[in-house]
Amino acid sequence: MINSFGKIPAIILLLGLTVQIIYLIHTPYNIRSNDADDHIKYIEYVAQNYYIPDWSLCWECHQSPFYYILAGAIYKASTIFGISDKTLIYFILQAFSLFLFSLFSLISVLILRKIFITDKNEEDKKHFSQYYIYCLVSALFVFWPTNIINSARITNDILFNLFYALVLFFLIRWLDKNQNKDFYLSILFSLLAFITKAHGLLAFVLVGACVLFVFAKDKKRFGNLKFYLKKAGLVFIIFLIGFFGSRLGARAIDKVGGGEEKRNIMVWNVGGGLNHLLFTENKVQNYVYFDTKIFLTEPYINNWDDKYGRQYFWNFLLKNSLFGEFFFNGLIAQNIAIGMSALLLMMMFWIVGYILFTTKESLKNNFVLKINAGLLLIVFAAFKIVLGTNGDFRLILPILISISSFAGVGILEYRRKGLKNMEIIGYSIFSLFAILSILFFTFAVFLEK
């Protein structure tokens, strides 16, 4: 198993898992979580009634059912084995989340390996080259603070992230090796992502984009048109199955029939009573202006208070990508959080710099992750523009796989152009970011009194 990653990435994964386990031990189910009690209501209903609840029963009862069926089975099994303490059952559900998240991390690191390590450069492990860049970006991903925070939550987001990462993995392998089984597996996991969370629709968009990419590259595309139409037809059929399996189909029929007219089909609970204080302004300035002073002086973001920069799209997105909308105790932790905010800002400028000033990319496999980043960023912006309220970074968490890959590709690109100083800056930013994240949780959570 270690050979699948390399020794250093395997150690990074184990260290990350260790940090996540310690975080789980220090974090009750309803701390730094989102709507945990409503997720639990859904799970308990399934466990007790062997049936999917009506949408109106709880805040999260509109969600696609697959995660809740699995979690409901775990809940029921716990009671069968004589566990009556709900606190312990909730901890077991958190442990299930941690298990799923460890698989998500594993697949994500395998994706990064696919980007940076190929059969032709296996021997580079002996040199300070792509193997060590792969190690560095793996650490960047594993120790990204919001990953640790999300790992212990009771939510369907984690299972969705796992399936979505598998879609990315098999699409990258399909584009690389052109084997039909990888394409079919990408569709299978798109279906599973869709019946886990309505956002799984994005997986089908991603698959469709890759089919178009392959079609555009094929010099005999029109001679092979029948082949591509079959693939497109298969994607559409599986999408329809997922559409109804995710409950979106039933909701769409209900909406056409005049029921729940104020509800949004995709985000069903937004129109049903979301506090108006969460809504923000939707002007051009909210998307083009970045308040650097707030970003570098306020350690965290608050979804209710303009003081922390929530009105500005980029302020909210970047800060939320670090710590969610949660506050942590301790002056040392706050100072580390500000330091990480500064590093994140440097990281974004550094990545944008290589994108703007390089004409050739070193690694072709990064195409899928480019599309992934663009798609998820558009979705995050659309959530804000259409619904008028900030989303949460957990909704687009797999974008971190793309960001981590861009970091590694950037090092290679700056090296190729002979910009040694920029290459060293990249190594420094990413290494320090991962170290500060571990220190942050040490002072903010593990040593918290």
Image (cartoon, grey):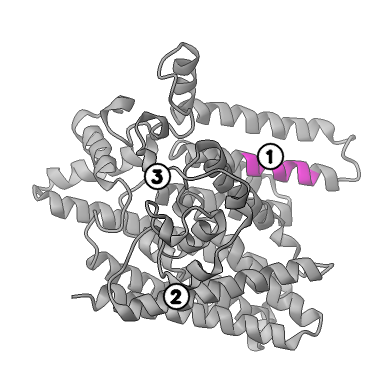
- The amino acid sitting under disc 1 is Gly
In the foreground, 2 or 209 = 209
- The amino acid sitting under disc 2 is Ile
> Mark 2 or mark 3: which comes first in sequence?
3
Q: CA distance from mark 2 to mark 1?
A: 40 Å
In the foreground, 232 or 361 = 361
In the foreground, 56 or 131 = 56
Quadrant in which the C terminus is drawn = bottom left
Disc 2 crowd rating (10 Å Cα; few below 14, some 14-19, many 20+) is some
Whether the magenta-drawn stretch holds residue 382 is answered as no
Q: Is residue 327 visible?
A: yes
> Does residue 220 appear left or right of residue 280 in this picture?
right
Q: Is residue 35 above or below residue 316?
A: above
Nearer the observer, disc 1 or disc 3?
3
> Mark 1 or mark 3: which comes first in sequence?
1
Q: Is residue 250 above or below residue 359?
A: above
**Residue of label 1:** 208
Q: Position of residue 381 (x, y in %)?
A: 58, 47
Q: Give, as a single range, the part of the protein colored magenta.
A: 205-214
**Residue of label 3:** 278
> Does residue 328 appear left or right of residue 216 in this picture?
left
Q: Position of residue 292 (x, y in %)?
A: 55, 68
Nearer the observer, disc 2 or disc 1?
2
> Does residue 85 appear left or right of residue 313 in this picture?
left
Residue at the location (75% across, 82% down)? 415
Label number found at residue 338: 2
Q: CA distance from mark 1 to mark 3?
A: 34 Å
Residue at the location (74% across, 74% down)? 120
Can you tell which quarter of the image residue 424 is in?
bottom right
Disc 1 crowd rating (10 Å Cα; few below 14, some 14-19, many 20+) is some
Q: Position of residue 235 (x, y in %)?
A: 64, 33
